[in-house]
Image (cartoon, rainbow, N blue to C red):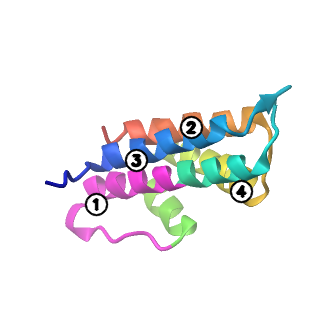
């Protein structure tokens, strides 16, 4: 029998995958040495954040919930619910989506901060 994961379990599964991939990036002197793994891990952790935010918005909006179609849609709707969560989302977008995934930063501090903020959002749906 197939077990259906809760949104929290699913987001945590993504985060665990991201952490495992990031281990392959080999950290030296505050930098990761393999951009490929940083990009993969950043994209996966960002996806975990969006999964958690979908559940967060579903709980807040109830029957009116429709899946957001863009980052701007997430920002507007999250901003109406909780400004602190919006701050985390903006930080995650900058650190994981833009810097880590899109630009391929190798900064350990940037990725660590993004992963930490992603976990804060995921914990909201626990």
Q: Which residue is mark 3?
A: 11
Q: Earlier in the sequence, mark 4 or mark 1?
A: 1
Report how far apart the C-alphas of labels 3 and 4 lie in the structure: 20 Å
For label 2, count other residues whose C-alpha is less than 10 Å away and answer few (under 14), some (14-19) or many (20+).
Answer: some
For label 3, count other residues whose C-alpha is less than 10 Å away and answer few (under 14), some (14-19) or many (20+).
Answer: many
Magenta segment main secondary structure = helix
Range of residues picked out in magenta: 47-69
In the foreground, 44 or 88 = 44
Q: Which residue is mark 4?
A: 98
Residue 46 numbered tag: none
Task: Please tell me in which quadrant of the rendered image residue 43 appears.
Answer: bottom right
Query: 126 left or right of 79?
Result: left
Q: Which residue is mark 2?
A: 19
Report how far apart the C-alphas of labels 2 and 1 lie in the structure: 31 Å
Q: Earlier in the sequence, mark 2 or mark 1?
A: 2
Tell me which residue sits at (73%, 60%) in the image.
Answer: 102
Q: Which residue is mark 1?
A: 61
Tell me which residue sits at (74%, 32%) in the image.
Answer: 109
- The quadrant of the picture occupied by the C terminus is top left
Report how far apart the C-alphas of labels 3 and 1 lie in the structure: 20 Å
């Amino acid at each position: 029998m197939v077990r259906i994961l809760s949104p929290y379990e699913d987001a945590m599964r993504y985060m665990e995958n991201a952490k495992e991939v990031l281990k392959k990036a080999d950290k030296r002197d505050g930098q990761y040495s393999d951009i490929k793994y940083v990009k993969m891990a950043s994209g996966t952790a960002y996806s975990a954040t969006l999964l958690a935010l979908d559940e967060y918005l579903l709980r807040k909006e109830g029957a009116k919930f429709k899946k957001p179609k863009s980052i701007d849609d997430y920002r507007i709707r999250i901003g109406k619910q909780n400004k602190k969560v919006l701050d985390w989302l903006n930080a995650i977008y900058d650190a994981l989506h833009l810097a880590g995934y899109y630009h391929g930063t190798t900064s350990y501090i940037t990725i660590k901060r993004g992963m930490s903020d992603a976990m804060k959002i995921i914990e909201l749906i626990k």
